[in-house]
Image (cartoon, rainbow, N blue to C red):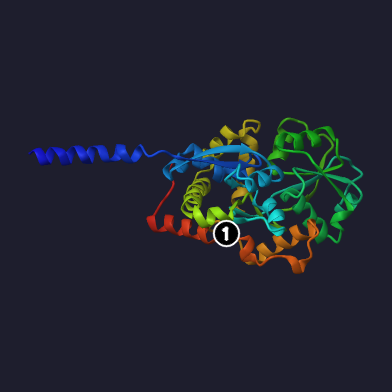
Amino acid sequence: MRKFLLLACALALAPLTAGAQPLEKVKMSIAARAMNYAPYFIPIAKGYFKEEGLDVEIVDAGGGVATPAQISGEIDFNTSASSALSPILRGANLKIVYYPWDKTIYQIWATTPEIKTLADVKGKAVGIQTRGDTFELGVRIALANHGIDPNSVSYTPLGLNNARRAAIAAGSLPVAAITPEDVEWLKTTSQIKNSHLLYDMYPDIGMPLAGTSVRTVDLEKNRARVKRFLRAVDKGFMYAVAFRPETVEIVSQFAKNSDKASLDATYKDTIVTRTKDGTVSEALQRQESSMRAELIKIDKDKIPPLNKMYDFSVAREAWDELAKEGWKPTK
């Protein structure tokens, strides 16, 4: 009887002991409180990061700020992976490991009636979020695809959501790249005024978005932690695909300055751009690295091999593990 009681006590205390394990604190940058960051918000709201042993702190920072912070060790997971390519091309010890989306849903809007086509943008200032980010790359690709020199315009960084919207509302810049969520917000608040759509990048432009970069040393020494992070993000990604109203509600809790109608309007456009397992094709990797190299004036023959810039093996492992476990999101 005594042995039985001791065994029963041990079994009863085992979950408490496991649960007492301290969570590992990490920092994750977020470039925008928007729908395409849902896979990163949902794991916080649903506890998926904690399930993977992580206590994740959000740092609001665009790629231009987040990437240097990551290089210096201040940020562990940078969700402006495309911006990280610039220092990677220059030899920084970072790698891109995950992409939830492979098409851009950005739109180019004009604030004056004189600008009717993309050709009219030449010589004008174009508002973007930060220099060298996916907004700028999207504009550059759109212009190049229409036979317009991407360097024939100037690029003005506007910062995060509110600043972009304010620029369109005030007409302070002739042209700006914004998101469908920005457009919906401007319409519902009657601030769109004389602005009009010049070009919708979706579905013409394939471009990875809202990806994750990590330090190379973390892939070498903390690979298990990187995988746990991506497992949680995968869970958030699957939840977002499965539950629209719930996803809109969760994102609205993080995106305080966006109304639910704007977020809901963006949901469908965002979800259809999803990748299969957090990875993108080699063709898109080459396009992205080539455009980035051109942007920062690195000769094409100086571009490193893809495996020096990207490593999606840990993303595939995380996705395959969840599939084998039969993991499914629940409300």
The answer to whether residue 321 is seen in the rendering is yes
User: In the rendered view, would you say 41 is above or below 308?
Assistant: above
**Whole-percent x and y of residue 112?**
88, 40
Looking at the image, residue 313 sits to the left or right of residue 127; the answer is left
**To which quarter of the image does residue 34 belong?**
top right
- Position of residue 27 measured from the top left corner of the image (x, y, whole percent): 56, 41
Q: Residue placed at 15% from the left, 39% from the top? A: 6
Q: Residue furthest left?
A: 1
Q: Is residue 214 above or below residue 264?
A: below
Placement of 263 over or under 314, stated as above or below? above
Report the amino acid beneath label 1.
Answer: Thr
Q: Residue at x 31, y 38 (%)?
A: 17
Q: Residue at x 75, y 42 (%)?
A: 129
Q: The N terminus appears in which quarter of the rendering?
A: top left
Instruction: Using the image as rendered, state which of residue 6 and residue 326 is in the foreground.
Output: 6
57 lies above or below 94: above
Question: Which residue is rendered at x = 69% and y = 58% of the image?
Answer: 91
Asked if residue 104 shows in the view, the reply is no
Residue 306 picture location, percent across and down: 64, 65
Report the front residue among 265 and 151. Answer: 151
Which image quadrant: the C terminus?
top left
* Lateral position of residue 22 relative to residue 154, left or right: left
Residue lying farthest to the bottom in this orientation: 301
Q: Position of residue 104 (x, y in %)?
A: 69, 52
Q: Callout 1: helix, strand or loop? A: loop
Label 1: which residue? Answer: 279
The quarter of the displayed image where residue 203 is located: bottom right
Within 10 Å of disc 1 (Cα), the crowding (few <14, some 14-19, many 20+) is many
Q: Quadrant of residue 175?
A: top right
Q: Is residue 50 left or right of residue 1?
A: right
